[in-house]
Amino acid sequence: MSFIAWIVLGLIAGFIASKIVNKSGDGLVLDILLGIAGGVVGGWIFRAVGMSGVTGLNLYSLIVAVIGAVVFLLIYHFLIRRRT
């Protein structure tokens, strides 16, 4: 998958995940980074249970990235909340 496709997928997935978890977006750059990290985390989770991870710029990959980004955000918020 190309660099531009990862950015587009990351932006969409990060925005959706931040709306699900925070009820508000986290900003353009943070949403992109969150979505890309979500794609990696989601791909790892899906491969661990025997399914394919991110396969390209398609609906399946978007779902994988959103699930990964939600998991990533929940863990992030849990760790940040424990520090304060």
Image (cartoon, grey):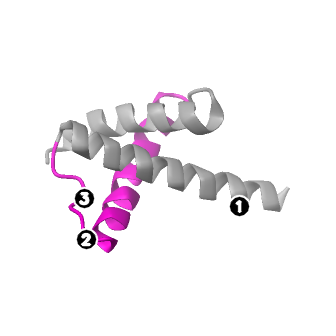
Percent of width and height locating residue 57 = 18, 39
Element type at marker 3?
loop
Residue behind mark 3 = 53
Region rendered in magenta: 27-56
Q: Which mark is residue 50?
A: 2
Task: State the SS at label 2.
Answer: loop
In the rendered structure, which amino acid carries the disc numbered 2? Answer: Gly
Percent x, y of residue 49: 32, 71
Q: Residues within 10 Å of mark 2 (few under 14, many from 20)?
A: few
Nearest to N terminus: mark 3 or mark 1? 3
The residue nearer to you, when weighing 31 against 52, is: 52
Q: Does residue 26 lie above or below 34 as drawn? A: above
Left or right of 37? Residue 53 is left
Disc 2 versus disc 3: distance between alpha carbons?
A: 9 Å
> Which three-letter amino acid code belongs to the residue tagged 1?
Leu
Residue at 46%, 32% (x, y): give it.
Answer: 16
Distance between the alpha carbons at the discs numbered 3 and 1:
26 Å
